[in-house]
Amino acid sequence: MSNYFIKSFEEYFGIYRKSVENPELFWQEIAEEHFLWRKKWDKVLDWDFTKPEIKWFQGAKLNITENCIDRHLVNRADKVAVIFEPNNPEEKEEKITYQQLYERVNKMANVLKSQGVKKGDRVCIYLPMIPELTISVLACARIGAIHSVVFAGFSSQALATRINDSDCKTVITSDGSYRGNKTIDLKRIVDDALEECKNVETVLVVKRINSNIKLKENRDKWLAPLLEEASNECNAELMDAEDPLFILYTSGSTGMPKGMVHTTGGYMVYTAYTFKNAFNYQENDVYWCTADIGWITGHSYIVYGPLLNGATTLMFEGVPNYPDFSRFWQIIEKYKVNQFYTAPTAIRALAKEGIEPITPYDLSSLKVLGTVGEPINEEAWHWYDDNIGKNKVSIVDTWWQTETGGIMITPLPYITPTKPTYATLPFLGIQPVLMDENGEEIKENQVEGRLCIKYPWPSIARTIWGNHKRYKETYFSTFKNKYFTGDGALRDEVGYYRITGRVDDVIIVSGHNLGTAPIEGAINEHSMVAESAIVGFPHDIKGNGLYGYIILKVIGEGRNHDNVRKEINQLITEQIGPIAKLDKIQFVRELPKTRSGKIMRRILRKIAHKDTSNLGDTSTLLNPEIVQEIMDNAL
């Protein structure tokens, strides 16, 4: 039983050794002791990375919602499962107990069944961060339908692409959503998307902003009256461990998104286990992840991971700066949040505002601070530690991907000694390796290479929906018999890992391989720099030059920009060497980012190359308008 919750560094090493020496036995024990199976598996693992084919807990039967909800009704029926904090702080919050969640999920499941949705059907969910989003996800899983959540900020074109790719027959949306002081007409976006989606039969509409929308006859239905009529009992569909649970789209280098397929049994075991240990979750804690359920972070660490552990998980509909920049800290004080999980992008944006928005609030309930989405730079790490954790709270800098399903490399709170900018050590059962350019494994420490995983873990995505060939080419063809993450990493003298960013962010300048992350790290230490992104561009002499897009803090805007440029290059020279100096520095208001906070370097690269003929679909960005602004001022 001790395997499930690690309590010391010594124990971590002992259990880690066991998990890599005999992975099948290790995962079998975790799965047997901590989950509800209707039928046990015939075989723990069957895998072949050359095909690639991975199967965990073959032959096992279960339903993930019985593990998320039903089994907690014995001891936790009245415990709050989900706290909903609305966009507007004047609107009353909602607290949903496990008993209420059980009834609401069953009602929603029965509504879906009444609309002809059955096991294996795909359901597109395009909702804001309201309780119906979590409930819809679980209702699909209850009846064996495959959910495909699309972030409710994506354009109609992006939505249509995803609906058509997975052939969804049903869409769940709302009349609109709140975002800060704005409202967004989600129903109109859905209507526009469905002009291109001929197979959608039903659209279920949640009333959120009470706008005056048109329902298309025989297709669109208000959800509320259907829920009122539905029974609050619904038997859970018996699923095979390898049945698909959901499809989640992640951006691809070609512009066509990849529909990553995650299956039921392995994903359940891994997300539950990582949640418990990476966040040191205890029975009465209140846990808050600020992500959107439209991303894998929301799937794994707002919905499934917390609920599998009987946790209280907080859903926030709003944004960090509405009504002002103190909103996150107000919420932490209001609910006495114990674990707070957010993105480095958000941390940097909040740091830019100084500490005035923080000081009025009591953050003493915090026990764990997490970061996710991209490697965190040292300045942001220390700001988080000093001002939010007050140097008393454990910081977990987690590295993982949509494709991995769960956290792969992370410190364990109060167990692993932390090191700023380092994700530290692999999670239990994870076997990372660094590969050189010749495809050879680098065994020693104090090295840099391409990050691969050499053995499957339970929550690895099994395929790309409808395109297994692309799955193989993207993840398993670069290095033989290894899963290639696409990231580069450093391994220090004690074996800690630091993710250096996408390998395609290595630029060869005058024959030298320069990773963009260390250069950006140096730039970001300048007192006036808030954030930076470096890309390469063709250079007559060096082959490639370095082009820097840099956001200045407000305090720097009055300074002579040429002087700031010189100071930035001086910093780079001191920390890395003159070879890494920037040839062009463009000061920008914002950087183009995905909704999960990743900088879209592909777009910045094209602008630097003066090739803006095909930037792809920029409407899915957090801030699509910034692209034109950067283009207009390009050097």
Image: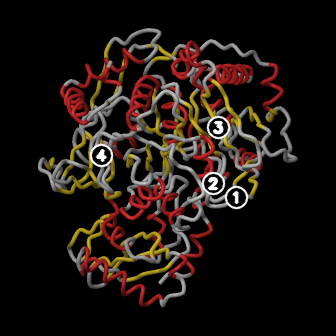
Residue 243 visible in the displayed image:
yes
Residue 323 is marked as: 1
Which comes before the other along the chain, label 3 or label 2? 3
- Residue 439: horizontal and vertical position, in percent? 18, 50
Vertical relation: 605 (above or below) 322: below
Q: Amino acid at mark 1?
A: Pro
Q: What distance separates the C-alpha of mark 2 from that of mark 1?
A: 7 Å
Does 558 sit left or right of 572 as displayed? right
Residue 327 is marked as: 2
Q: Amino acid at mark 4?
A: Phe
Question: Considering the numbered disc 4 on the image, is that residue within a helix, a strand or a loop?
Answer: strand
Contact flag, marks 2 and 1 (Cβ < 8 Å): yes
Q: Which residue is mark 3?
A: 125
- In the image, farthest residue toward the left: 444
Residue closer to the observer: 20 or 487: 20
Q: Amino acid at mark 2?
A: Arg
Does 578 sit left or right of 178 as displayed? left
- Residue 536: horizontal and vertical position, in percent? 36, 73
Between label 3 and label 2, give the one nearer the viewer: 2
